Amino acid sequence: MSINQPAYLPWLGYFERIAASDLHLVLDTVQFERNSFTNRNKVRTATGWTWLTVPVNLKGHLSGLAIADVEIADDHWRRKHWSTIQQSYRRAPHFAEHSGFFEQLYARPWHRLVDLLDAITRYLLRAFAITTEVREARSLGVEGRKSDLVLNLCRRAGATRYLSGTLGRDYLDEAGFRAAGIAVDYQDYAHPRYAQAYPGFEPYMSAIDLLFNAGPEASRILLARREEPAARTSP
């Protein structure tokens, strides 16, 4: 099982961890963090890369908002994002195969950030042929903070193994997981190299970069190293 906060146009490692899990929980009950990947990500351009950021409305919420409650601030970003994606990837070999979905995505007005993120993520899961069950963490009705929250979600879901991101090493109480009979693995994703639309290679772009450039081969490239012994398991 794995857990992650929702992200805008997520990177490859996001999907690799989902693919390595039997169940993935989208953690949208925690507080939204400014300047995080929840509402922004990188795309490749002719001059390197650029951020695409979805503006959100946080005014009047000094104590913070749960990700599930964050609203998108305006509609002007949609035209800009779609224009940037078109200009950056129109010559990519497989852009045309997926452009219809993204054109419709950016033509539609969005109110809640999580609805936009869910639509993108589920499309990319299908494109990468990832069939893992994905559920919203809020559906489990679990509370807690940091390690306790993760452990409580794992227990409620009946998990016996938890696949954490690398940052989990900084806060997970592995002793608590062992006491609950849950093993902890840490993702150590080795980013693949592949042909991009421009000379050179820029890693850690949005997963659409691989999809537009590799097409049907994207899933194989994304998951090629999944079977390698890259993760450490807690004793």
Image (cartoon, rainbow, N blue to C red):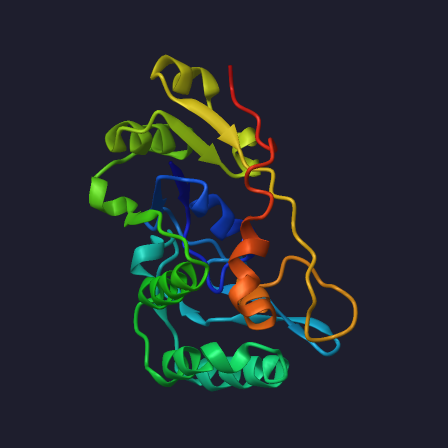
**Looking at the image, is 214 positioned above or below residue 11?**
below
Horizontally, residue 104 falls left or right of residue 212, namely left
x then y, percent, for residue 82: 50, 82
x then y, percent, for residue 206: 56, 63
x then y, percent, for residue 149: 35, 33
The furthest residue to the right: 200
Q: Residue sitting at 35 percent across and 16 percent down?
A: 181
Q: Residue sitting at 32 percent across and 31 percent down?
A: 154
How many numbered marks, from 0 up? 0
Front residue of this view, candidates 143 and 164: 164
**Looking at the image, is 81 positioned above or below residue 125?**
below
Front residue of this view, candidates 56 and 110: 110
**Looking at the image, is 209 positioned above or below residue 172?**
below
x then y, percent, for residue 220: 55, 55
Horizontally, residue 165 falls left or right of residue 159, namely right
Horizontally, residue 3 falls left or right of residue 218, namely left
Q: Image quadrant of residue 118?
A: bottom left
Question: Is the N terminus in the top left, top right, bottom left or bottom right quadrant?
Answer: top left
Q: Image quadrant of residue 158?
A: top left
Front residue of this view, candidates 202 and 195: 195
**Looking at the image, is 229 positioned above or below residue 87?**
above
